[in-house]
């Protein structure tokens, strides 16, 4: 059920406003507190008619903690206890059924000492079920024991513990003395050891008969307090719920682990209210529960309240909220989890309900939160679309029982992510890559891997990052890291390496992209692109006549330009307003409205032949136009790509070796001139041998290259090796597809 159907914003306006802080939400504790209070309030409103006081539902009753039990034919087994007279006696399944208004004895053994029944959320509330998330199996907070595949003997022992360790505990005795209904506890706790031993034997025998292989579910009591009434569940008694609440305070707040009394008087870390506070063992995403390799001498567990002081009310909200925020999870790789938790700095009641609605979707998503978040935050009809929502983003590596935070970005800008996604999609639909009427695209890359169509099997072919129809893919990819996984070389470390992922380039790029004030260094970005290019080209040798990784190059090119267009690229020490050429995006119109002035300007920039297109392409790219060295790397690649395409012409009978002779990974500043001379020689030979060519082929490349290398020797250039090879690779893709345009008579034959 959607939260909006339970929270009637107008009806519950005051209650929702009480939940919200009177300051901005910022820390993970603030966010978890909000989700915890929303979750407990949601439960109390949804189940307000079940006969359990709302304040206890809000303070750690957990009716939704074990949905797997709802699928079982029998999810709970209870011992009927009759305290309607002055003595305590054990009843039977028949007694429980007979006390109901409408009963049917046919489906039970009326003499059985246990009452077995299916369980649902309302029943778990009535039983007072309160699960301790940090424990793997059973717990002792409420008068209901949660077990998994336990033997008959174990089950019988746990039922005895309900009396000896719960009802006869000091905490229960303390509540009994203070509460007006304390006599209920006293009577239940009055059973002698001999009575409990007999109970244990009869319960064991019944479990051996009913569940010989073991039982999974809840063990509890059904209590009759008045003749003529029904056998009630423990959670229907306020006095028993009060014991559960105090056990939480005592065992998870005041004393836990090595702390004997982690309480003091201070200001609540979240609400700012003064009073008794606790250290609390639970923490959002279990950030402070893993074992540390470091040693911290003289630290006192009893003083932990000084670090993150929480009142009992806030602590309950944090404990409840921790189980909610853990649902905002996406499984990345083995032992690596991504948490993406949406929040607003200053939500109003309606926005708070929208956030909790998203949490309910996360609970049903089973570890794939990225798709949920992406669908919600890219949907313009969503209540959160224009709300200024932010994301708490954390990537955690959890090998074994260790835990290492790889990324923690507390305020991811959704708008920044949208800007990147929109820039990416706009580029895919622009004149840069898409043919217009009477005009070819400015970048003559082949359409390999880029398509808006679907195959017969209704599955997309090619990369989703090269499909303008898959606009949500970029947003999702930015969250999951897949956006950069599609373009970076995979430097996956050894699975046993404790530092696995700490320096993963996908992780680094994602962190830089998602931070509100962070930027990606374009030189570093090319350092990640080039090894992938080299590897894919090397893999394609022997399989392709033109071994150019066009799809990868196009993905990298579009990604780079999208990041530049969104303002994400930057260089250390860059002054405000100063944009180095490498950080400037391609100057290309992305508008589709023919009446738009920018569109008209783009039409004026159209080209009629390959010479004009090359000029326009270079002029449109500040990184090329403002740096002749980079332009030289691109032009050399384009010339090699053009000659490789010429070699594969079906009308020529030529060896197809130029691409293999000059692969991406072979180019260096020291070898640039040698490579250029070899390529120029081959171009001259082909020009002389081709009867359709009246002069030198590819003059648009040759003349520019000669001017550049004669201006400054390549050995003196300042380009990094990645910059050199990246633009050389881009040139390869450009050149191999730089065929004749229309009917214009270029200086080379159309077949070339």
Image (spheres, rainbow, N blue to C red):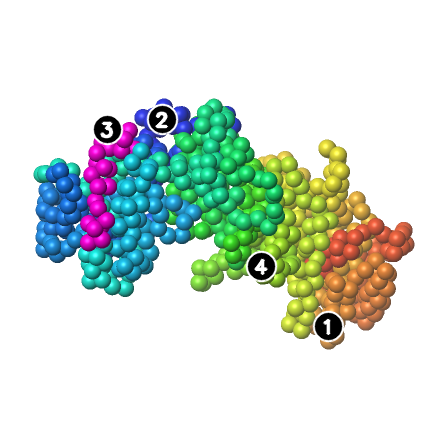
Q: Which residue is pictured at 33% across the width and 37% down the height? A: 171
Query: Would you name the residue on which mark 2 appears?
Result: 15
* Residue 750 image point, x, y percent: 71, 63
Q: Which residue is mark 1?
A: 656
- Spatial CA span between label 2 and label 1: 76 Å
Mark found first going from the N terminus, 2 or 1: 2
In the image, what residue occupies the spot 62% across and 54% down?
A: 499
Q: Are marks 3 and 2 in contact (CB under 8 Å)?
A: no
Question: Residue tagged by mark 4?
Answer: 449
Q: Is residue 152 left or right of residue 606?
A: left
Label placed on residue 513:
none
Q: Mark 3, residues whose alpha carbon is within 10 Å: few (<14), some, or many (≥20)?
A: few
Q: How many marks?
A: 4
Mark closer to the observer (4, 2): 2
- Give SS at disc 3: loop
- The mark lying in front, picked from 3 and 1, is 3
Quick check: 414 above or below 461? above
The residue under the point 40% across, 25% down is 17
**Sequence-wise, which precedes: disc 4 or disc 3?**
3
Magenta stretch secondary structure, dominant:
helix
Give the x, y percent position of residue 179.
Answer: 26, 29
Q: Is residue 196 magenta?
A: yes
Secondary structure at badge 2 equals helix
Report x, y in % for residue 427.
61, 46
> Local crowd at mark 4 within 10 Å, few (<14), some, or many (≥20)?
some
Element class at badge 1: loop
Given contact means CB atoms under 8 Å apart, are the residues at marks 2 and 1 in contact? no
Q: Residue at x 74, y 69 (%)?
A: 660
Q: Which residue position is annotated with label 3? A: 180
Q: Give, as a single range, the part of the protein colored magenta.
A: 175-198
């Amino acid at each position: 059920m959607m939260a909006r159907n339970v929270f009637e914003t107008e009806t519950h306006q005051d209650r929702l406003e009480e939940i919200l802080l009177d300051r901005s939400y910022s820390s993970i504790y603030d966010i978890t507190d909000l989700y915890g209070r929303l979750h407990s309030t949601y439960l109390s409103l949804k189940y307000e008619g079940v006969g359990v006081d709302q304040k206890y539902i809000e303070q750690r009753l957990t009716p939704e903690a074990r949905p797997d039990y709802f699928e079982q034919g029998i999810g709970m087994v209870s011992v009927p206890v009759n305290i309607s007279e002055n003595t305590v006696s054990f009843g039977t399944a028949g007694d429980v059924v007979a006390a109901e208004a409408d009963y049917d004895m046919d489906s039970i053994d009326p003499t059985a000492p246990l009452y077995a029944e299916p369980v649902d959320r309302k029943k778990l509330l009535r039983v007072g079920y309160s699960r301790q998330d940090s424990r793997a199996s059973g717990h002792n907070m409420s008068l209901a024991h949660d077990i998994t595949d336990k033997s008959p003997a174990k089950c019988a022992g746990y039922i005895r513990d309900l009396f000896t360790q719960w009802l006869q505990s000091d905490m229960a005795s303390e509540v009994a003395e203070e509460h007006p209904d304390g006599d209920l506890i006293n009577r239940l706790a009055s059973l002698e050891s001999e009575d409990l031993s007999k109970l244990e034997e009869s319960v064991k025998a019944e479990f051996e008969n009913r569940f010989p292989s073991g039982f999974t579910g809840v063990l509890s009591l059904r209590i009759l307090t008045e003749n003529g009434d029904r056998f009630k569940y423990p959670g229907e008694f306020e006095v028993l719920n009060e014991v559960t609440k105090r056990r939480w305070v005592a065992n998870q707040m005041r004393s836990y682990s090595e702390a004997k009394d982690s309480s003091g008087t201070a200001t609540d870390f979240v609400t700012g209210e003064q009073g008794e506070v606790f250290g609390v063992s639970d923490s959002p995403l279990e950030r402070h529960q893993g074992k540390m390799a470091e040693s911290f001498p003289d630290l006192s567990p009893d003083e932990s309240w000084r670090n993150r002081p929480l009142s009992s009310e806030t602590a309950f909200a944090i404990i409840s909220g921790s189980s909610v925020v853990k649902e905002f999870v996406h499984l990345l790789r083995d032992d690596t989890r991504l948490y993406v938790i949406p929040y607003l700095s200053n939500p109003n009641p309606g926005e708070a309900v929208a956030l909790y609605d998203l949490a309910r979707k996360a609970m049903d998503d089973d570890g794939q939160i990225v798709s949920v978040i992406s669908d919600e935050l890219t949907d313009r009809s969503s209540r959160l679309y224009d709300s200024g929502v932010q994301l708490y983003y954390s990537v955690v590596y959890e090998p074994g029982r260790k835990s290492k935070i790889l990324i923690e970005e507390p305020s991811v800008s959704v708008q920044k992510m949208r800007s990147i996604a929109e820039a990416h999609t706009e580029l895919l639909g622009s004149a840069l890559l898409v043919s217009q009427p009477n005009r070819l695209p400015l970048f003559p890359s082949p359409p390999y891997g880029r398509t808006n169509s679907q195959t017969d099997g209704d599955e997309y072919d090619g990369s989703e990052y090269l499909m303008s129809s898959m606009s949500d893919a970029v947003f999702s990819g930015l969250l999951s890291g897949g956006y950069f996984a599609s373009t970076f070389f995979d430097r996956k470390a050894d699975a046993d390496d404790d530092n696995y992922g700490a320096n993963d380039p996908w992780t680094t790029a994602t962190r830089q992209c998602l931070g509100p004030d962070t930027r990606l260094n374009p030189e570093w970005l090319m350092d990640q692109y080039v090894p992938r290019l080299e590897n894919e080209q090397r893999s394609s040798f022997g399989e392709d006549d033109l071994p150019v990784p066009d799809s990868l190059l196009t993905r990298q090119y579009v990604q780079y330009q999208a990041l530049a267009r969104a303002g994400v690229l930057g260089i250390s020490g860059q002054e405000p307003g100063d944009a180095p050429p490498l950080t400037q995006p391609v100057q290309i119109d992305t508008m589709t409205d023919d009446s738009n002035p920018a569109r008209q300007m783009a039409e004026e920039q159209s080209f009629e032949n390959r010479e004009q297109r090359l000029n326009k392409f270079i002029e449109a790219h500040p990184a090329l136009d403002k740096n002749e060295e980079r332009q030289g790397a691109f032009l050399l690649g384009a010339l090699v790509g053009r000659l490789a395409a010429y070699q594969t012409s079906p009308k020529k009978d030529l060896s197809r070796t130029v691409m293999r002779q000059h692969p991406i990974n072979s180019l260096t500043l020291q070898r640039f001139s040698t490579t250029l001379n070899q390529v120029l020689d081959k171009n001259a030979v082909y020009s002389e041998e081709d009867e359709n060519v009246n002069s030198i082929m590819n003059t648009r490349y040759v003349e520019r290259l000669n001017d550049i290398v004669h201006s400054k020797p390549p050995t003196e250039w300042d380009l990094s090796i990645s910059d050199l090879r990246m633009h050389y690779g881009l040139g390869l893709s450009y050149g191999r597809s730089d065929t004749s345009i229309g009917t214009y008579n270029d200086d080379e034959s159309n077949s070339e």
